Image: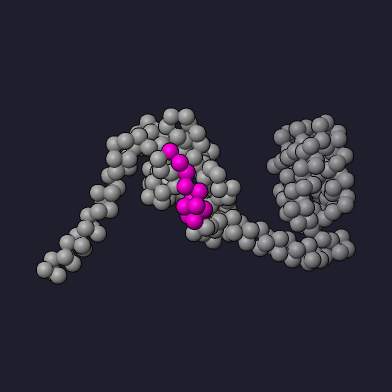
Amino acid sequence: MQKIIVVATFLLLIVSPSLYAQKIKVKNDIATVNGEEYLRISKNLTGIYVNTIIDNVPILEARYHRYPDPARSEQNTVCYFEVRIEGTNDFFELDCGLSDKKNIIKMIYNNGFYKDGVIDIEKAKLYESRNGKKHTERQNQLNKLEIAKENNRTNVIIVNSRDNCVTMSQNEFNFALTTIKDEISQDSKLLKAKQVASSNCLTVNQIEQIVNLFLLDSKKLDFAKYAYAFCYDQNNYFRLRNSFDFINTRKDFEVFLEAQN
């Protein structure tokens, strides 16, 4: 008799999940449990949203996020949802692969977040505390690593034809590039670009990005000639040739470059 009970219990453990899984269905943005309407759930480019059936009152929202992390993904990006349950004043995070519409409804129903028209705040908070914010923590860790790298870069003095030439860090350059972009006219862009160049040591790659902000070849050539004196890797300056649209401008640039050697 004892063996029969053990076997029956074992079979129940195997069979019950599949039976239980059949209770929840999602069709046309309506989630049902055991054939009865439970919640309304919709999905768009920004995330997944769960509301009540009758009054369309918000119950849960799962906002879609993505961030770069070469260590954890072949595509160098990680996808996750920031999940907020109405009334908890907090959030937790779920991997995108676990967060389709049906799984979200399963999570709400199986954990008792919403029952008989009421959100159980205590159960929701308990689930939040168990799942945590692993993606936010990972991004904070990556930011600290990036800051450390930038600090290391700015603390290294690279010497070339310009004495004590210190190349700009990526963050510094991105900020400078934005200030140039924000200028309205081509003349004001050129003036700002020259200010940035004369105050810093730029790589050819950085100079090329600034050159490509100008619409006119005349402005591109003007800045390229000016920035040469402030370039760290002048031996690569020939790469700027392809930044010019017209053959005559390219020839003028080549003549200028030959004169520097």
Say if 59 sits above or below 159 in the image. Answer: above
Q: Residue drawn 82% across and 61% down? A: 166
Q: Is 151 positioned to the left or the right of 120 in the image?
A: right
| Residue that lies at the very extreme toward the left in this rendered image | 1
| Residue that lies at the very extreme toward the top in this rendered image | 54
Q: Nearer the viewer, residue 160 or 252?
A: 160
| Quadrant housing residue 232 | bottom right
Which residues make up the magenta segment? 117-128
Q: Nearer the viewer, residue 234 or 66?
A: 66
Residue 73: image x %, image y %?
A: 50, 56
Residue 189: image x %, image y %?
A: 83, 37
Say if 40 sits above or below 254 in the image. Answer: above
- Say whether residue 202 is visible: yes
Position of the N terminus, as image quadrant, is bottom left
Specify whether residue 204 is painted magenta: no
| Quadrant housing residue 213 | top right
Q: Is 33 positioned to the left or the right of 43 in the image?
A: left
